Image (spheres, rainbow, N blue to C red):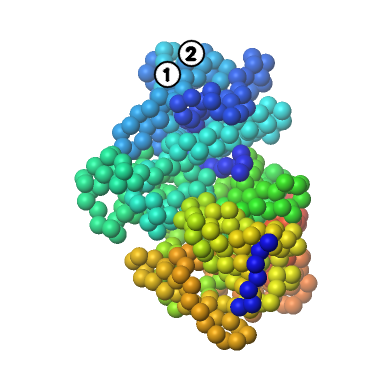
Amino acid sequence: MATTSGTADTSMPDSSTAAGAVGLARGVELHPRHDQAFPTLTPPEIERMRRFGEVVRYKDGDMLFETGKPGPGMFVILSGHVAITQRDGLGHVTPVVEQGAGQFMAEIGQLSGRVALVDGQAEGDVETLLIPPERLRALLVAEADLGERIMRALILRRVSLIQGGAGGPVLIGPPNAPDVIRLQGFLTRNGYPHHLLDPEFDKDAADLIARYTPTPRDLPLVVVPDGTVLRNPSVSDLARTMGMIGHIPKGKLYDVAVVGSGPAGLSTAVYAASEGLSVAVCDSRAFGGQAGASARIENYLGFPTGISGMALTARAYNQAQKFGADIMIPITVQSLDCGRDDGAFALALDDGEELRARSIVVASGARYRRPDIAQLSDFEGRGVWYWASPIEARLCKEQEIVLVGAGNSAGQAAVFLAAHAARVHMVIRGGGLGASMSRYLIERIEATPNIELVFNTEVVGLEGQPESGLSGVRIRSRLSGGESAMEIRNLFLFVGADPATGWLGGCGVTLDRGGFVTTGVTADGETASALETSVPGVFAVGDVRSGSVKRVGGAIGEGAQVVAALHGFLGDTAKPAL
């Protein structure tokens, strides 16, 4: 029993096209679901697909697609053979698999036309049916049974890429370095394959370090497939260099722009795009939002054995792309302009571009609150965490850790981390969990022997040096006022939430005292639709909305509900996107 003190999945997402990912590793036949991941199409199935593509022929030695370059679409091989090889930025070329007649080459990133992760070269004369991304999405919808098989294969291939660490960038640096963890977290949360080399043990990595002589501040080095070497890049620089971020077509006017790709934003994207609206989605970090941090959600409808937040939102992410939503990550929205003469809204983006849409859905969510603790920012990424993934769990192996929070996300994180840490001290400001946590989680925590519940207590201080990381925390009883110190190297914070609404300043959208978006009332005090803000055409859903339930199920429901309001605003005869 927990002691009390008084004081996965197959749904990985986007990012690269292609053709490439058809077999990952040196023995695709060993894939646990090989027949599903690498099916051979029958002649009648290929005939059904012909209306979606065109026949393209290649000569011996021609490249069908190349690592790091946008691929033209999904290839169905009609005759001949194509050799798939993996090429990384260090100059290593590794044979992966050979594809023949009846097989197709693509992975989940091809739905949005991202760059290829591997090379495909014709061996002899090759005839293919080339299906571009927009026609591939049409095929998946029009040919339900065949589309289901193809979609499953695309997802499983991306999963293989991630699990095998094939394709994508090479990170070079100490595994526990804060900036290594930062970049690994970004790539992992976005479902992008990558691998890490420790220069202490890997000769190639050590040679590269010697060649570039980086300072400690320059690590990690990141080598992208074209050989470009980045010195400790920001996530935006890394994403742009690798072609992760899609480009906004010049002059395009979307029907709806969604800001935020958590459960509410993804739900909006799926339902709006499936009903024919042109949809753009922006997010500054990764899809999934706070829900992506949930190690296991067991009370979401339809998943009796539970599902991780990452897996659940990855499914929605793939689904939104299937219906044609343009998802741009990482892109930060800096401001909203509601006063255009043409009636359109304009989002100013951090890359200097502008995204125009006829309506806006605010789904930017809320972020875990940073408690008022001295030097907190100095230790973020150096022992202070707001996310509990396998990356952070690795750092806690056989250690005692402190976790602060009393909500469902805190409970899920505590149970997950307890499987890795020696002991989890769960610090709670109040005197119980019943008011803020689901009963099934409370029972799970109480049944976990290495979780200690510390009630009526708060963290008031941190110890250590920013360069070397956190070494301890000070806690204080809210009943007696007494303080004590704990030797702790990892502190997890899941406390409260601050709405991400700073970008709405000056556009006329009304916020409540806490900064959450108010809905259902116009600027003149008249009644509006339940999810519409004080600015007509701007809607809010999910955690960012004042009065929302702050649960994954509620956020997804609001995302679906807002689509009816969007249709009402845009009109039954919505103009096609330019």
Asked whether disc 1 touches disc 2, contact meaning CB atoms under 8 Å apart, the reply is: yes
Q: Earlier in the sequence, mark 1 or mark 2?
A: 2
Query: What amino acid type is highlighted by mark number 2?
Result: Gly
**Farthest-out residue, right:** 527
Between 154 and 69, the one lying in front of the other is 154
**Measuring 30% from the left and 47% from the top, which residue is drawn there?**
200
Residue 198 in view here = yes
In the rendered view, does 220 fall on the left or right side of 78? left
Characterize the local packing of mark 1: few (<14), some (14-19) or many (20 or more) Cα atoms within 10 angstroms: many
Secondary structure beneath label 1: strand
Q: Position of residue 274 (x, y in %)?
A: 70, 44
Q: Distance between the residues labelled 1 and 2?
A: 8 Å
Camera-nearest residue between 51 and 1: 1
Question: Can you give x and y, in whole percent of width and height, for residue 57 in the image?
Answer: 47, 17
| Lateral position of residue 405 relative to residue 551, left or right | left
Side of 232 relative to 129 (left or right): left
Whole-percent x, y for residue 326 in the image: 57, 47
Residue where numbered disc 2 is placed: 80
Q: In this view, does 492 lie to the left or right of 216?
A: right
Q: How many labels does the image show?
A: 2
As rendered, which of 550 and 258 lies closer to the eye?
550
Query: In which quadrant of the rendered view does residue 195 lie?
Result: top left
| Up-down relation of residue 553 to residue 498 (above or below) | above
Q: What residue is disc 1 on?
A: 122
Q: Going 39% across and 15% down the picture, which residue do you hit?
A: 60
| Quarter in which the N terminus is drawn | bottom right
* Three-letter code for the amino acid on which mark 1 is drawn: Ala
